[in-house]
Amino acid sequence: MLFFDMAGTSKSGKTKGAGSFVRISLAELNRCLKPEASVIVNRRYVEALNMEASSFQANTVALKNVVKHSAVAPINEKEKIQIESKTDW
């Protein structure tokens, strides 16, 4: 069996068992993104809805470019949550 060193590290790629998909409500997307924002979705999902879309090469540079041009809405201070962690188990 041959192993190849990917991207300069042996830890590159998807972790075994990690999912590539998440669920988020359309309302949450609408709250955070401009109306003209480009949203990346699974090709099969678009096909199941009988819609057409342009292809997208999912890589770090392309994803950063989409996020940069989506102009994420600022988060209101009241919407931020507080997370408390215990360090004395």
Image (tube, rainbow, N blue to C red):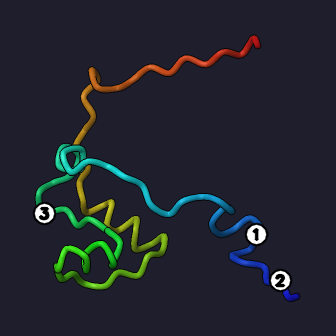
Q: Is residue 54 above or below residue 38?
A: below
Numbered tag placed on residue 36 in the rendering = 3
Q: Which residue is mark 2?
A: 3
Residue 75, percent across and down?
27, 34
Q: Which residue is mark 1?
A: 9
- The front one of 66 and 16 is 16
Amino acid type shown at disc 3: Glu
Decide which of tag 2 and tag 1 comes sooner along the chain. Answer: 2
Label 2 CA crowd tier, 10 Å (few <14, some 14–19, many 20+) = few
Label 1 CA crowd tier, 10 Å (few <14, some 14–19, many 20+) = few
Q: CA gap, disc 2 to disc 1? A: 12 Å
What is the total number of numbered labels drawn onto the structure image? 3
Residue 85, percent across and down?
61, 19
* Residue in the image at 27% along x and 20% along y: 78
Label 3 CA crowd tier, 10 Å (few <14, some 14–19, many 20+) = few
Decide which of tag 2 and tag 3 comes sooner along the chain. Answer: 2
Q: Quadrant of residue 51?
A: bottom left
Which of discs 2 and 3 lies nearer the camera? The answer is 2
| Residue projecting furthest to the bottom | 2
Quadrant (top left/top right/bottom left/bottom right) for the C terminus: top right
Q: Secondary structure at mark 2?
A: loop
Q: Is residue 81 above or below residue 3?
A: above
Q: CA gap, disc 2 to disc 3? A: 43 Å
- The front one of 24 and 36 is 24
Q: Quadrant of residue 1?
A: bottom right
Q: Is residue 35 above or below residue 75?
A: below
